[in-house]
Image (cartoon, helix red, strand yellow):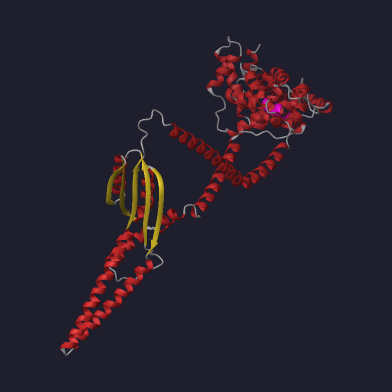
């Protein structure tokens, strides 16, 4: 028991770190206890062994690298002073990434909301209305005209656009229009071509599926410089419903007339019914024709494109006016781009403001906790 | 020099680094057990010390203060990578090359065994042994570096040396004979 007690003190005894009283007590015990003497000797050897570890020196280049780091720090005195220095550990990097993600997310949400608003009314409306369900529904309606009509989900809109373009190469533009129409699953319904004063120009009527209307208009606008553009949508839903109701009524009327005919006894009666039947049938045909026409118009949007080749400045060596125009256009475009950047920065800053505020608060809190041990 | 460095004088601090780099590097090397981590920890410590020089109150010795920062930096790295093998082959060569080139294979082996035994200690005890037997601090100074009472230093050292004694039992007599 006593022996164990002394063994615990031997380590400090070796180092001469015992109080005078403890020191003499251990010495006294060692005189009488051989076991503790052996233990002490072995402990001494162990300590010596550890102390014989060859000294390690800082590698070459270490001091230089520290100096470089210190100079970098010293170049930013504000960080060495009051503000706790930013430490680029993985944790800091992660926090920065998170803040960035949140910021981007916020901006995207804001963007999404704005896109739903009235940015370019005619175009977005067109896109919004042409839901795939509506498209297939239209075709179904056209084939079985007596089916029930759901006005809310089946808007019938005739889309038309009028574009007037100026192009560099008339023939190339014509080919591109054809490609655009056909790749959208449509066709060129009409085209005319002429030349006035040596400038070729023409007009084309493109018919494309209504679902592709917006993309086609966009593609056509890429062909040349848009001089004039008009887009319209005519809602014919009401007329559609009305027509169908009238057709149904007339068909019922026709059935009744036919049943009268069976019971008619006199020739004069028969003739009157026959006359009325012919009128009703005619009207039905007329109305269903109108329905067919309308659904065709709704299914295929119409895009009228006027194309004019740009006047070539033949003869003159240098088109000074054109150069001036281009310079002015470039100048204005640059200013517009700069303003757009400034605007985006302002929007970004305001979007980030709440996030930064929360981040700064958290950072201050953390740095205060971290500073405690120093 | 310390006062000058405190004012943000990078040149004065460079001299301080020159004076302390071997001791600090030795500490981080023995704690982490390999060259790369030792370098990282020591560099981290010197930069951290420079940044927080203004908060160094001068009540403690500068050396103690610097050792505390370096020890914490080294322990940070050790804790971050606990699955490191105690002594890598690379380390054997480092230790041997750092000593005199005439050292024979047996001696290198002894060095490796000792470093391995130290690396096998729990970090608390390892820090105490390194500060005492390699850095040569007194108990009071160790207590200041570790920020624990002197009694704790004493018991940690005692336990550490018992473990080392058991691990290096076969080497101990031989090692003493060779070092003559």
Residue nearer the viewer, A186 or A270: A270
Q: Nearer the viewer, residue A55 or B13?
A: B13
Q: Is residue B59 left or right of residue A140?
A: right
Farthest bottom residue in view? A265
How many labels were placed on the picture? Answer: 0
| Residue sitting farthest toward the left | A267
Question: In the depicted view, which residue is nearer to us: B87 or B17?
Answer: B17
Q: Quadrant of residue A240?
A: bottom left
In magenta stretch: residue A77: no
Q: Residue A201: which quarter of the image?
A: top left
Q: Position of residue A99 (x, y in %)?
A: 58, 43
Q: Which quadrant holds the N terminus of chain B?
A: top right
Nearest the viewer among A111 and A119 is A119
| Figure quadrant of residue A98 | top right
| Residue A52 % position (x, y) | 66, 17
Query: Quarter of the image containing the C terminus of chain B?
Result: top right
Q: Residue visible at 61% across and 13% down? A: B99
The reply to whether the magenta stretch includes residue B48 is yes
Residue A164 position within the rendered picture, expressed as x and y whole percent measured from the top left:
37, 48
Q: Is residue A74 visible?
A: yes
Q: Residue furthest top?
A: B102
**In this view, A57 is above or below A256:** above
Residue B160: in sight, yes or no? Answer: no
Outermost residue to the right = A21
Q: Give the x, y percent position of residue A51.
A: 67, 19
Looking at the magenta stretch, what is its main secondary structure?
helix
Q: Which residues are magenta?
A: B46-52
In the image, is B136 to the left or to the right of A101?
Answer: right
> For the point 32% across and 59% down, which residue is it?
A299
């Amino acid at each position: 028991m006593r022996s164990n007690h002394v063994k615990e003190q031997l380590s400090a005894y070796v180092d001469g770190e015992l109080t005078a009283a403890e020191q003499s007590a251990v010495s006294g015990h060692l005189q009488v206890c051989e076991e503790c003497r052996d233990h002490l000797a072995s402990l001494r050897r162990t300590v010596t062994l550890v102390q014989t570890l060859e000294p390690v020196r800082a590698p070459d280049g270490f001091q230089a690298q520290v100096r470089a780091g210190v100079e970098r720090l010293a170049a930013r005195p504000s960080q060495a002073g009051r503000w706790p220095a930013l430490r680029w550990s993985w944790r800091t990097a992660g926090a920065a990434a998170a803040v960035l993600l949140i910021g981007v997310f916020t901006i995207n949400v804001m963007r999404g909301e704005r896109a739903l608003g009235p940015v370019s009314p005619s175009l977005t409306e067109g896109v919004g209305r042409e839901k795939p369900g509506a498209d297939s529904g239209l075709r179904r309606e056209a084939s079985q005209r007596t089916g029930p009509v759901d006005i809310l989900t089946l808007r019938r809109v005739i889309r038309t656009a009028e574009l007037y373009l100026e192009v560099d190469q008339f023939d190339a533009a014509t080919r591109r229009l054809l490609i655009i129409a056909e790749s959208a699953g449509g066709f060129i319904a009409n085209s005319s071509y002429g030349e006035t004063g040596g400038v070729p120009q023409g007009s084309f009527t493109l018919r494309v599926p209504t679902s592709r209307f917006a993309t086609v208009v966009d593609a056509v606008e890429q062909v040349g410089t848009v001089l004039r553009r008009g887009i319209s949508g005519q809602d014919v839903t009401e007329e559609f419903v009305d027509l169908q109701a009238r057709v149904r009524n007339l068909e019922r009327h026709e059935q009744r007339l036919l049943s009268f005919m069976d019971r008619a006894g006199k020739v004069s009666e028969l003739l009157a019914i026959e006359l009325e039947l012919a009128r009703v049938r005619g009207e039905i045909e007329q109305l269903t024709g109108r329905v067919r026409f309308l659904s065709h118009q709704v299914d295929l949007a119409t895009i009228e494109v006027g194309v004019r080749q740009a006047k070539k400045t033949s003869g003159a060596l240098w088109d000074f006016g054109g150069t001036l125009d281009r310079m002015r256009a470039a100048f204005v475009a640059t200013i517009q781009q700069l303003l757009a950047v400034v605007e985006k920065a302002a929007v970004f800053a305001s979007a980030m403001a709440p996030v930064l505020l929360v981040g700064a608060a958290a950072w201050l809190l953390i740095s205060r906790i971290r500073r405690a041990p120093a | 020099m310390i006062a000058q460095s405190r004012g943000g004088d990078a040149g004065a601090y460079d001299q301080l680094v020159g004076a302390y780099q071997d001791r600090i590097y030795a500490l981080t090397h023995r704690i982490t057990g390999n060259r790369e981590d030792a370098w990282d920890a020591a560099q981290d410590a010197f930069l951290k010390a420079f940044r927080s020089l203004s908060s160094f109150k001068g009540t403690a010795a500068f050396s103690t203060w610097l050792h505390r920062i370096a020890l914490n930096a080294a322990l940070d790295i050790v804790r971050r990578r606990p699955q490191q093998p105690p002594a890598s082959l690379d380390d054997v060569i480092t230790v041997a090359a750092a000593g005199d080139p005439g050292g024979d294979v047996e001696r290198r082996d002894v060095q490796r065994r000792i470093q391995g035994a130290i690396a096998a200690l729990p970090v608390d005890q390892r820090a105490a042994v390194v500060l005492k037997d390699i850095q040569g601090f007194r108990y009071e100074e160790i207590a200041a570096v570790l920020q624990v009472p002197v009694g704790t230093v004493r018991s940690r050292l005692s336990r550490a040396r018992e473990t080392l004694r058991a691990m290096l039992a076969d080497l101990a007599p031989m090692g003493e004979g060779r070092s003559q």
